[in-house]
Amino acid sequence: MKTTLRLPATEDGIAEAAALLRDGDLVAFPTETVYGLGGDATSDRAVLGIYAAKDRPAHNPLIVHVPDLVHARAYAVFTPLAEALARAFWPGPLTLLLPLRKGAGLSPHITAGRSKVAIRVPAHPLTLALLRAADRPLAGPSANPSGRISPTAADHVLDGLSGKIAAVLDGGPCAVGLESTIIDPSDPPRLLRPGGLPPEALAEVLTLPATPAAADPHHPEAPGQLSSHYAPQAALRLGVSSPAPDEIWIGFGPTDRTPALTLSSHGDLAEAATRLFATLREADRIAGPEGRIAIAPIPNTGLGLAINDRLSRAAAPRS
Ligand code: TXA
Ligand code: MG
């Protein structure tokens, strides 16, 4: 087992991360949403290495990260609506699912044999600097073992993947804290995953149902949206205003009883999103594997839709 390096957010750190990536090694990188498990998206060795390091099912494709729309057009076919969304929200927490441009050089394992590729331009200066220094499109699923809680800090990445990847570029905590919103802008456009792009911002360009269309379990459009995901070790109970004495209670907003932890004491959904995964990790640590976590109701509006999506999967029966 190799030692995973923690690289600083400096010019040298970026250069070392880029060199590792160009050699086909795996480097986790920060984005505004969560940390991604980066690998050269044109290298079969790197892409297969990502599936292995995460223990990710081979049928679950990977998002490609590029530094700008011009690079994105090299790998995906843009319609006018796709262009409008990219211009409005890139760089930012939006992933577009678009027809793959064949022969553009992506490893076939990126799309797991599908005809569409998921692509995004992240809004984090460090990620953009890394993408330019590496001069490669980077595959980047969330940098956690498959099915577990997504990482919003370099320590979370090391908790799950230490010894399995070459390095993590440490950019501190992620500002948004929830994965990107995924949209397929074909006709009719579809929301595949609610995420870090607030629905009210999206509505300025495109009106979509606030929750994803029910997925066909046999042919899911985004196979990663399987029911159990983001799971702590402890059992998780949702919408709880009166926790049992043995439950570690996570609050939201002002409450009569004092919670063990809170997503936002003044009920701010953006703050709750930023803190969600780190708070679940902390509750899990306190509760222990046989323990129980309960979480207060979160309003199902704005970023609350994506928070509740993650929580319902975190609480789903484990397979
Ligand atoms: O914010 C994010 O999107 C983060 C950061 C690192 O960019 N990445 C991320 O990747 O959340 P991941 O792999 O954890 O989630 C990607 C989701 C999965 O549900 C996957 O099934 C879906 O996107 N997906 C990726 N490529 C796809 C494709 N070609 N067709 C359908 N679904 C795809
Ligand atoms: Mg993930």
Image: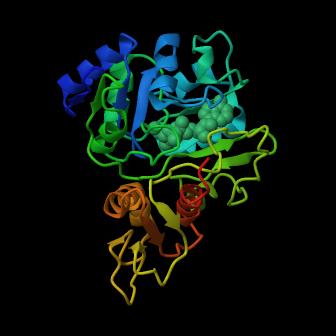
Residue depicted at x 60% and y 30%: 57
Confirm whether residue 43 shows in the render: no
Residue at 59% over, 69% down: 301
Whether 272 is drawn above or below 172: the answer is: below
Residue sitting nearer the eye, 60 or 210: 60
Viewed as shown, does residue 139 lie left or right of 260? right
Residue, far front: 290
Give the quadrant of residue 102.
top right
Relative height, residue 33 to residue 300 (above, below): above
- The N terminus lies in which quarter of the figure? top left
Instruction: Left or right? Give the position of 103 relative to 235.
Output: right
Residue 44 rendering spot, x and y as whole percentages: 53, 12
x and y percentages locating residue 94 in the rendered image: 55, 44
- 279 or 292: nearer the viewer: 292
Q: Position of residue 127 (x, y in %)?
A: 36, 33
Query: What residue is rendered at 39% in x and 45% in y?
Result: 151
Percent position of residue 12, x then y: 18, 23
Colour mode of the rendering: rainbow
Left or right: 22 with respect to 71? left
Asked if one can make out residue 238 in the rendered structure from this viewpoint, the answer is yes
All told, the count of numbered labels is 0
| Along the viewing direction, whichever of 82 and 300 lies nearer the viewer | 300
Position of residue 243 in the picture relative to residue 265 (left or right): right
Towards the viewer: 103 or 218: 218
The quarter holding residue 202 reads bottom right
